[in-house]
Amino acid sequence: MTNLSVVIGTFNQKDSLKLVLESFTKQTYKDFEIIVVDSSSTDGTEEIVRTEQCSVPTLQYIRQENNGKTAARNRGIKEAKGEIILLTDADMIADSQLVEEHIKAHKKYNNACFEGTTFNFLKKGSDAVEPYIKQKLRAGQKLKWAYFLSGNLSIKKETLIKAGMFDEDFKSYGWEDIELGYRLHKMKIPLYYLPSAKNYHYHFVTDNDMVKRKYNMGKSAAIFYKKHPNFEIKMFLGMNPLAMGIYRFLKKYPRFLKLSQYLREEFEYRKGLEA
């Protein structure tokens, strides 16, 4: 039995996916499989994966209807043969020791989740990077459920299934992984920081893309709260009187949005909450 299954959902990301798959051919730990679930890409993704299968014989390609990222991940989890699931994305280039570090962590802890370190490239054509998580965290530190970020995260398949996997009501960008992390937290499954497991986010977001993303995050946040309508989640999602007051002001006086990009993004996020 394969020890670990890497699950990657993708849609029209052939260029970055090629780099990701190539990075998995250089892993120091070899006993793993890769499952790519393609949500009906139209950019030639299938051809790229079929080519890479020559270098990665344990690479499985699944093409299905585009029902969103959550559906793709769930399909990959169901098809996985590994005891451990490593969740990542089609734009996350793996460090050569990524799989090995996740395997070592699971040998140390019986039933836990592990959040690795993801670095963002600052701009195209540059090797300069910065960590996605800015807070200073210790190796092995127990993390709050809000750090359950599925770009570099491992967990037992059995545990994921018991938790109900990803909620497929989340169709837009954001919160689907953290919502699952909250359910695992309720199940008393610990989440630990694993900085030695590294990957690199090869994705560049424009200002307009960020505004659209914030709007979709607002829609997803509203779904999150409907599923967990308690004070903790309400405060976590920013549904507090001050934040909502700022949103109402911006809605009434939209010209003030020009003061900063942050305010614009915040406005779109709140608009998504009400959508």
Image: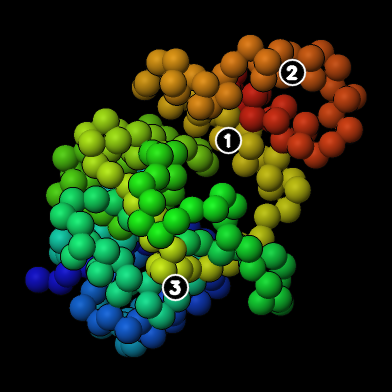
Vertical placement of 168 versus 221: above or below?
below
Q: Is mark 2 on a helix, strand or loop?
A: helix
- Give the numbered dot on residue 94: 3
Task: Name the amino acid type tagged 2.
Answer: Ile
Expressed as whole percent of the image width and height from the top left, the position of residue 73 reads 33, 52
Task: Report which residue position mark 2 lands on.
Answer: 246
**Left or right for 107, reference 229:** left
Expressed as whole percent of the image width and height from the top left, the position of residue 269 reads 64, 30
Q: How crowded is mark 3: few (under 14 residues within 10 Å), some or many (20 or more)?
A: many
Expressed as whole percent of the image width and height from the top left, the position of residue 30 reads 25, 82
Task: Report which residue position mark 1 lands on.
Answer: 216
Q: How crowded is mark 2: few (under 14 residues within 10 Å), some or many (20 or more)?
A: some
Q: Is mark 1 on a helix, strand or loop?
A: helix
Vertical placement of 269 versus 150: above or below?
above
Question: Which residue corresponds to the image point at 45% horizontal and 23% vertical from the top-left?
Answer: 233
**Left or right for 217, reference 65:** right
Which numbered disc, 1 or 2, marks the residue that appears first in the sequence? Answer: 1
Report how far apart the C-alphas of labels 1 and 2 lie in the structure. Answer: 19 Å
Vertical placement of 18 versus 145: above or below?
below
Q: In terms of depth relative to the viewer, which is nearer, 69 or 121? A: 121
Asked if disc 1 and disc 3 are in contact, CB closer than 8 Å, the reply is no
